[in-house]
Image: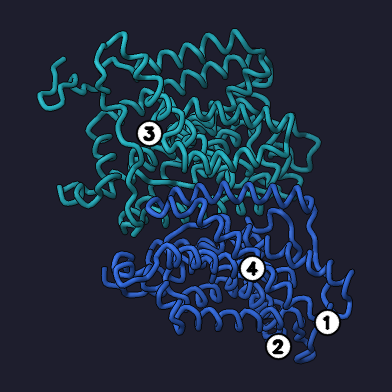
Chain colours: A blue, B cyan
Amino acid sequence: MFEGYSLAELGSIFAMQGFAGLILFSVFVLMALGLAIIFGQMGVINMAHGEFMILGAYVTYLCSNFISSTAPALFPAYFFIAMILAFVASGALGMLVEWGMIRFLYRRPLDTLLATWGLSLILQQVFRSVFGAREVGVVLPDWLMGSVAVTDTIEVPINGLFVMALTMGITAVIYAVMFRSRWGQGVRAVMQNRTMAGAVGINTEKVDRYTFGLGCGIAGVAGSAFTMVGSTGPTSGQLYIVDTFLVVVFGGAQSLVGTIASAFTISQAQSTMEFFLSGSTAKVLTLLTVVVILMLRPQGLFVLKVRR
Amino acid sequence: MTRNPQTGLLDRGLWRIDGDVVGILLLAALLVIVLPLGLDIFRLNMVGKYLTYAFVALGLVLCWGSAGILSLGQGIFFGIGGYCMAMFLKLEASSPEATKIQSTPGIPDFMDWNQLTALPWFWEPFHSLTFSIVAVVAVPALLAFIVGLAMFKRRVGGVYFAIITQAFAAILTILIVGQQGYTGGINGITDLRTLKGWDIRTDEAKLVLYFVNAALLIGCILLCLTVRRSKLGRILVALRDKEDRVRFSGYDVANFKIFVFCFAAALSAVGGAMFTLQVGFMSPSFVGIVPSIEMVIYCAVGGRLSLLGAVYGTLLVNWAKTMLSESFPELWLFAMGALFIGVVMVFPNGLAGLYQQYIAPRLRRPFVGRAKMPAAAAPIIPPHTAAD
């Protein structure tokens, strides 16, 4: 598959595809982070995660339309407002769902899977009824357009760079919240030993609700970032959900580092292979490799050692 | 018949006649007598199509209801069974005479469109009907065996198993859609005409196929009932409820799980093959993640613990789907979503559970005169323990 390319060309191809892979990586990481918190920490399978992401994307779309029509002066910065709104909207919906549905199902993980799948169908139809079946895209402000030429043959788009920077920022914030704050300590305590955490005075139900809300809120931010690199339709979320679950499981469900490492591996493998093989073959090979590795090492790449 | 000294119930013989068997006879009467008399051939063919999904639901009752293994990839096996049948029918439909306008006569039309000049090697054996029928059951069972062996021997179960089967469903769909020249791509294998010279598109053929399908379904229900009543069936329930205890009693838990997964796969594949025969095509839209999860809901609505419930659930959900999408296409996804949530949260034992709870006691009273329910009304929710 390499014949016909000179060494320099190959280098450029790898760099460009690597960068395309990094954008995919960013979307994976943002989606997987929320999922890793919900699945890894709480053991809940949220099949509607993709729809929470799409909710964020639609909020961004609405926000961009609203600001460009009412306050064009703010337009260059609309994305930051949209991101906060997306977080709040998805997070609030997430907390509502936890309160109305998930909290009755903690002991039946397979049933949460089915119930949240039902929720995802309903949300999809809501999106379709409200926004129409056509995909929508946002208008990027000028400063996000264009690309930076690194060398003669390598160019990187600015919106991709921005999404990557955003991903790193959000990851850092989540790390700080989960591992450096008192609240995160409470979350981890509840997940590791619910009874003891309750005994030392942590309100476990409240922690559950906020954790689920946080996971969904991050999905909303992921959707916000997703509008930078792709267009949004009612079923866009479903395209990513299985990939994201594989990312989380492959990384080792309870480890944030593992999630990031596996998102990196999977996205890089896929986008590099995509150039040389057809898109579908690349995807099949990537998924198959991941599944086979998971069969050999079911606990994932990184394992958090917890004494139970 | 002897009474069990502990429970006072009749001894659980493998072939005893009881409510289940009466229920199967009623279902058989409904499928073979009532529906053919009451419906025109178009609607009957539709019911036949729904019944092919009931094979999948039966498999899920054993795999998920009895043994607690939720597979979200039953569409894979349904699809493979269907594709095996479709490959045979397609080869018969693309004889050199019928395809002489193609640049390479004698190969299926979609291969010709994709510039293939020879039949791929894995299509060759499908010239034989015997091989195709064996392949319908054997290929999915073999795949299920490999997946099951890899997963269950390593004690992967629960949620992880569900996600991995789902990934397989995604992989197979992408593969089928991507390899257009070999599989017919997104359109699937269409334009199937005859089975050994017998035109399957006529109304008489559809009627015959409907009866074959119904008979196969009843046969499969009886087979599942036998499995559930045997010692094997009770071990499956035991490993669902307390896997470790079964393991400590000296059973190799993985082998039982592999068996039931393969069995469910083979059942789904039979359904897929009958689907192809009755509907006349097979496409990747019956393989992927969405149809696979939908198949789970058929089983869940009927009642994940009841074989007959699964059949009625399949019929009901599909009938509702057809009715709603004919008149209110917007509402269907809402209804489907509500069904998923409702069946999990409000009535986890589905129709069969409601029947056992409200109707069966009233029916039983005049005949038995004893309020004590037999063991069939057993557990409410399989207590799934943490998935690790």
Answer yes or no: is residue B117 visible.
yes
Q: Chain of mark 2?
A: A
Same chain letter for marks 1 and 3:
no
- At x 30%, y 64%, the residue is A195
Name the residue tied to disc 1. Answer: A146
Which chain letter goes with mark 4? A
The spot of residue A80 in percent (x, y) is: 72, 78
Report in which chain the residue with disc 3 lies. Answer: B
Packing grade of label 1 (10 A; few <14, some 14-19, many >=20) is: few
In the rendered image, which residue does mark 2 sit on?
Answer: A8
Q: Earlier in the sequence, mark 4 or mark 1?
A: 4
Residue at point 67% right, 27% down?
B323
Q: How many numbered marks have been drawn onto this rendered protein structure?
A: 4
Q: From mark 1 to mark 2, how far is it between C-alphas?
A: 24 Å
Kindly report which numbered mark, 4 or 1, lies closer to the viewer in this rendering.
4
Looking at the image, residue B109 lies above or below residue A80: above
Label 2 environment density (alpha carbons within 10 Å; few <14, some 14–19, many ≥20): few
Residue linked to disc 4: A88
| Three-letter code, disc 4 | Val
Give the Cα distance between marks 1 and 3.
59 Å
Residue sitting farthest toward the left: B5
Query: Circle 4 — which element?
Result: helix
- Select label 4 or label 2 by which is in front: 4
What distance separates the C-alpha of mark 4 from that of mark 2?
Answer: 47 Å
Q: Who comes first in sequence, dot 1 or dot 2?
A: 2
Q: Which mark is residue B305?
A: 3
